[in-house]
Amino acid sequence: MEVDIVCVGFGPAMGGFLTTLSRGLATAGTCPQIVCYERAEGLGFGVSGVVTRARGIRSSFPDLDPSQIPMAAPVADEHVLYLLDPHGASRRSAALRVADAGLRRSGAARDWSFELPWTPPFLHKADGLVLSIGQFNQWVAEQLMTTALVQLWPGMPVAEPLIEGGNRVLGVRLADQNGEPGMDIRAALTVVGDGPLGPVSRIIDATMGTPAGFERNDWAVGMKMVIELPAGCALASGTVLHTFGYPEPEIFGFLYVHPENVATVGIFVPSWFDSPVRTSYRYLQHYLRHPAIWRHVAGGRLRSWGAKSLQESGRRAEPHLVGNGYARIGEGSGSTNVLTGSGVDEAWTTGIQLAEAVLELMREGAPYTRENLERTYVARRRASWVDEEARVSERAREGFQRGVIEGLAGMGLTGLTNGRFAWPGEPMPPHRRLPSLEDYYKGRIPPEEIAAMRRECSSKAVPLHDALMDRCGWPPMEYDGQLLVSHQDALLVGGKVQAPAGYADHVVFLYPSLCENCPTQLCVEVCSGQAIVRGEEGHAPVFDREKCVHCGACVWNCTTEVGDGSGRTNIEFRAGAGGLHSTEN
């Protein structure tokens, strides 16, 4: 099939692109054929509660009334909390233990937390919005469909780009289904917005290369719950809590309050948290139970749950933005601001910039060559606040390569000096910085006990992290069937995870023999949906796509390189359908 423009992925960046483009086309009176393919079964099945300054979004909707968008609210109040450990189970440096003891003795800590008296300006989201990305995407899609200028196709994963001569993209190929080959969609322009783990973007990188200095070594998995708050909860709509320090010092958390007594609560587990059994779901439950959070959510009810990988390298992860026949927008194009921890509005704005460039080229009758896209789209991006602020934040998180205190100091230094100074550190691929289990738990759990735990968990085909966390003093979770539920119940009740028939597995162990010899099998520990489980002893893990939420954490948590000199690890994330089925995410 031939179209004029084919788009891959429907997130905030593509929303900004198609909103701006459709308005320009309506004014011009032209009607090219524009098709957008999205992997998820619904256009509103995005994952993230978010707080954003919404500068780009408001430029597209200058008269925006947040009440038009379900779960949207203007930011009303912001607080930053340092969370102490009420159990003594986390791994804290001597400096943090001294600081914690001082806060407790001085009486400055309330509910095992200390509210910072001053919030750094770069963290403020003044005049911003609290959003549910799922609801926002669905709202944007509804606006687009009324134009009749754009075709949106959910449940249609794109497998690969069509590349000619190694330097021109001619369109895309849809994923095979039920043994039938996927359709080729040829287009003058392919707009790539499939994120940092999307197959189209990755194949373009592998074929056409990446710029000098390109690296994607910093990642995080964000996991969150949408909670119906208990009656009488004092938190007002638009309240934003940023937290750090617990459940582990490396893990950041958040609580955003939506209208109608609903909140998004979650954590970010970063790649520089050097646990060889890092997990998300159990840490999220401990986060909920922290006294400073629990006092707001106790008695609440789980409405939705989800997880996704976040690319945390910012501008360092910017690939070639354009080439002959293609352009990239959004998170996968390196637009995330790693100092402010914001990416939605930045992604939306890159979509606006590309749409303005496309409209300019249409008026000129010019083709979508690399040179033309450079002088229109890339030039707009370089002159914008998105690129200016990305340059300021580029080195903001280097300090975390050395430690938590160095990382926090580095962020403050970068923010307060407008990017002139940063705490030095060299980002490393996540799998190259992980210690062994024995080294990580040295002084806490004897090696022979770890070996016994490993054998027992392997024989039961269960992750190892629960046994290790129990042994280190983390209290067991007391499930209430409403808010604190098992991981399996979270999948069924909160995530509503499903996978359509007819597609091949999208998580692939390239060389199973390498997995058999992997001492950690971290992919099992980090899997957000329990979709990867231990195989029989001495065998590779087993993947169940019916449980996969498409978070992609398995890819950057794989610890085994394939050995071809490329640095690639042994898990490949291919095109696939299914995942979460909730618009509240």
Image (cartoon, helix red, strand yellow):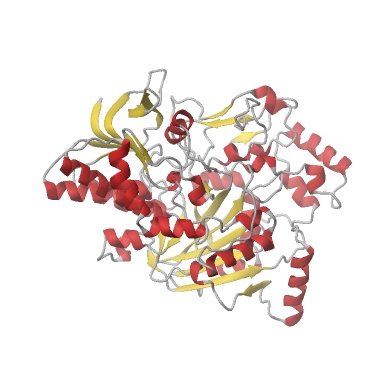
Asked if residue 153 lies left or right of residue 249, the reply is left
In the image, residue 17 sits, relative to residue 460, either above or below, namely below
Residue 575, by quadrant, is top left
Which x, y percent locates residue 11?
A: 38, 47
Q: Residue at x 29, y 66 (%)?
A: 65
Residue 344, by quadrant, is bottom left
Which x, y percent locates residue 357?
A: 26, 47
Which x, y percent locates residue 132?
A: 41, 56
Q: Residue at x 12, y 47 (%)?
A: 28
As drawn, the residue found furthest toward the left would be 29
Asked if residue 359 lies left or right of residue 493, the reply is left
In the image, residue 71 sits, relative to residue 365, either above or below, namely below
The quarter of the picture where the N terminus appears is top left
> Visible in this render: residue 144?
yes
Asked if residue 187 lies left or right of residue 573, the reply is left
In the image, residue 450 sits, relative to residue 64, either above or below, namely above
Which x, y percent locates residue 102?
A: 76, 76
Q: Nearer the viewer, residue 556 or 527?
A: 556
Q: Nearer the viewer, residue 489 or 499?
A: 499
Q: Nearer the viewer, residue 530 or 517?
A: 517
Q: Residue at x 64, y 37 (%)?
A: 523
Q: Residue at x 17, y 46 (%)?
A: 25
> Visible in this render: residue 146?
no
Please tell me how many numbered marks the rendered image carries.
Answer: 0
Q: Nearer the viewer, residue 347 or 411?
A: 411
